[in-house]
Image (tube, rainbow, N blue to C red):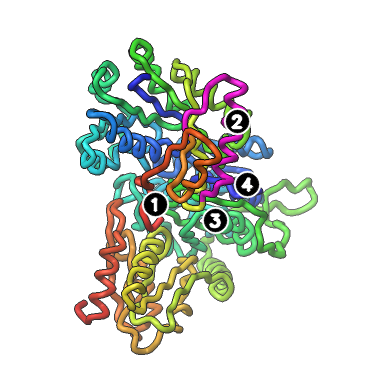
Amino acid sequence: MTKKLMKGNEVIGEAAINGGCRYFFGYPITPQNEVPEYLSKRLPEVGGMFVQAESEIAAINMVYGAAGSGARAMTSSSSPGIALKQEGISYIAGAMLPCVIVNMVRGGPGLGGIQPSQCDYFQATRGGGNGDYRLIVYAPNNLQETADIMSEAFETSDYYRVPVMILGDGMIGQMMEPVEITPPKKKRNLPAKDWATTGTDGKRKPNIINSLYLNPAQLEEHNLKLEKIYEDIKANEVRYEAYNVEDADVVCVAYGTTSRIVKSAIMECEEEGLKVGLIRPITLWPYPDEAFDKIKKDCKGLLCVEMSLGQMIDDVKIAANGRWKSYFYGRTGGMIPEPEDIKNEIKKIIRGEK
Amino acid sequence: MSNLKIITGHSGSGKTEFCINFAITAKEKFQSVILADLDIVNPYFRSREREDLLQSHGIKLIGSAAGLHGLSVDIPAMPPELFGAIDNKDAFKIFDVGGDGIGAKVLSRYAHLIKRAEYDLYLVINANRPETSEINGALKHLADISNQSRLSVSGLINNTHMLRETAIDDVMKGFDLCKKLEERTGIPLIFNVIPKHLKQIENKIDNIFVLKNYYMRPDWL
């Protein structure tokens, strides 16, 4: 396939099919409506199935069922819709089922607004649902990266038996860019899904998909088993982009759409002779702590920029571990930061005014 | 020549960017220019988000959230001023319609009035969009949009681009597709839309419309 001009939400749809997804369950909400629209048309063409559920809660439980039978299934929504899905996500994590959940984040809390935001960072990385569980959370910042990550997401989820979340925002979902959708680059050696509820044919014991462990000793054992998987993921799946980090007097930290605005501000700073770096986490969990180790000792500070009032800043502080001061700048409610304002914040840190 | 230009096309074909550029260009020639945002499908990347820009050029914006300065109120409703605009013989009017047949459906409510006035309905084609990359897809969109709007398409606009990566080959690919479409349907190719950096294409094809700017796309995107 050559490059096509596509909208972010369409890229999610086509890349999901490319990654082997054949089942979509969802409920409409702006700004991700083109995902279900696209898949409702495309999935039947590839032998798959699209269901518009009666609610977000129904949709995630349909994913739970489809994933439990071993199928590659997904759902997508935006912030308040993802909030509704949290119980199902926790069940899926507890039952160790692979699936992909897409969140095109909009302003909150509550119904909020329909413009882009990053105010669901806590929800995505701290677990909106109950219990000791983790999602692998990817935050692409352009549509080619969205295509590549989405294409590989099902493979990754199958490998670890951990749900994957793609955390975009309204801008990623709605913007257009040239994209080429190619077969997933990273092929994994996947174990057979011998846990799936595919029918016993009277030849084996039934498989049971469940997240209920009333015996605390057994539940602790289950938690420790999950924890071991999470440690594996931390060791192997961290992804980030680092730009001029070693030499920088200020290192910005930003993900998704915001990282592009920050990059634009950094370019302007460079024209003025300032040394500014960027750490762009691509996985929000596991967080790329190691990227911070390359920052020089006398760096004047870290500037975390988000479309929220400060959520990822907590992870920046954990990664900084007291080595540098961490500052924050953000716009929220669907407002998008301007490169000029970010530049001013960078300069304040350099001048010691923050 | 009609002074009502209705711009339709596939979602993401670049209608709104063209409409804003078209309105600003038209204002150089016409005393009074009206841009109406008729998109009730998608609340993102809408001409109403550029109300301040249009105002600074002396262009009047009509839309469900006009006067709210870019506020993204998701109201699938059309304001009453639209009736007046259709009958306004003194103004040059551009209607920026929502994507696909579903977006063009909003026109059917005004079709009896539009037919009474003189109008042009243009179909924007971007041959780099998967669904309109070949003749059958383009024909399907043309039929959908005519059927849903209850109006007839009178011109084609070749807006084949790859955003900032647009090359001459992209424009020519769209040009060839539109010429095929013109042959099949008799609907003429009206404009070839090009970015500023491709001005040299002028000696290859006629009916060039040069974009002044990417008004809908922030510099960092």
Q: Position of residue A70 (x, y in %)?
A: 66, 51
A230 vs A267, nearest the viewer: A267
Q: Are marks 3 and 1 in contact (CB under 8 Å)?
A: no
* Label 3: how many Cα within 10 Å (few below 14, some 14–19, many 20+): many
Q: Position of residue A232 (x, y in %)?
A: 58, 73
- The residue wearing badge 2 is B137
Q: Nearer the viewer, mark 4 or mark 3?
A: 3
Q: Position of residue A79 (x, y in %)?
A: 38, 50
Chain ID at mark 2: B
Query: N-terminal of the two: label 4 or label 3?
Result: 4
A29 vs B63, nearest the viewer: B63
Query: N-terminal of the two: label 3 or label 1?
Result: 1
Which residue type does callout 2 highlight? Gly
Any part of residue A171 in sight: yes
B103 vs B208, nearest the viewer: B208
Question: Alpha carbon of mark 4 to alpha carbon of mark 2: how far?
Answer: 21 Å
- The residue wearing badge 3 is A144
Query: N-terminal of the two: label 1 or label 4?
Result: 4
Question: Alpha carbon of mark 4 to alpha carbon of mark 3: how far?
Answer: 15 Å
* Label 2: how many Cα within 10 Å (few below 14, some 14–19, many 20+): some
- The residue wearing badge 1 is A105
Which residue type does callout 1 highlight? Val
Magenta residues, as a range?
B166-191
- The residue wearing badge 4 is A17
